[in-house]
Image (cartoon, rainbow, N blue to C red):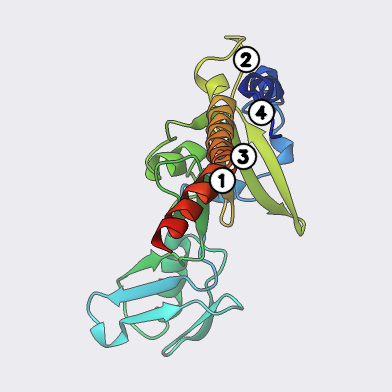
Amino acid sequence: MIRRRSFPLLMLAAMPLACSASPYTEGPSLGENPGLLPLNLEAEIANGQFFVGPEDKVSVNFHLHTELNREYRVRTDGSILMPLVGRMQASGSSREQLEDRILEAYAAYIVDPVATVDIEYSPERKVTVLGEVERTSVLPLTSPRTTVLDVIASSGGIGVDGDRTGVLIARRIDGRMTIKHYDLNALFAPDDPNMRTEIPYVQAGDVIYVLRTWEAAYSAKLDLVKETLQAMTFAERVILNGPRTAEALQGDLDEDG
């Protein structure tokens, strides 16, 4: 004999999921321990732009000597190879610094050289945004002053099931991936109005992940329980009705015979 399973019992088994507190609402909020996510780009942030690095594209345009106009891809050793002046180190320079160095180098060959330098940053400077956002994205970084709020906004914002108190930033530090939790609500509505908060800057290679709220996760588990019960009820009906179905089919066969 098959016993019907009790839906209330399954509900009671699932209740601890709803009663337990979100594991992502505890812990440090913005700015409490920035040392866990150290910024290695302080000079770039102060400068307001990235320094030139490998795989960046450098465009040099001379105003009068257009035959010297070139586009260069910065090599892995940080250098570019230019006509007349030869190899020049570009990595680690701001756009203005590199422009000054190029003009100084070409002053030995051209009277009062005038040129402009433009930088197209490598697409390898990127961050990944995953989880409960409107659009999971891989976003190129064009400024060292890009914050976690900027990249979340560029991904359409936090979705309806997203947890504003559960934003994670994963970053590789000294060869190890470190994950830090941030509570965005603490930025705009801190428990202590005198608490100083900081919006963290992102770095190339960061992965930002917005977690799902525990309410949404609990609702999804209830839907799974409901679907499971429906499947069990259907299977139970098939089994209970099996003998009668077999008898009916047997009767039809006897009449045909």
Q: Which amino acid type corresponds to the residue marked 4 in the rendered image?
A: Arg
Q: Which residue is mark 4?
A: 5
- Give me the residue at 45% from left, 59% from top: 253
Three-letter code, disc 1:
Gly
Residue at image mark 3: 168
Which residue in the protein does label 1 denote? 242
x, y percent for residue 105 = 45, 78
**Circle 2 or circle 4, nearest the eye:** 4
Mark 1: secondary structure:
helix
CA neighbours of label 4 inside 10 A, class few (<14), some (14 to 19), many (20+): few
Q: Nearer the viewer, mark 4 or mark 1?
A: 1
Mark 2 or mark 4: which comes first in sequence? 4
Q: CA distance from mark 3 to mark 1?
A: 53 Å
Above or below, 126 against 227 in this view is below
- Residue 176's x, y, as percent? 76, 55
Answer whether labels 3 and 1 touch (C-beta < 8 Å).
no
Q: Earlier in the sequence, mark 4 or mark 1?
A: 4
The amino acid on which the numbered mark 2 sits, given as a three-letter code, is: Met
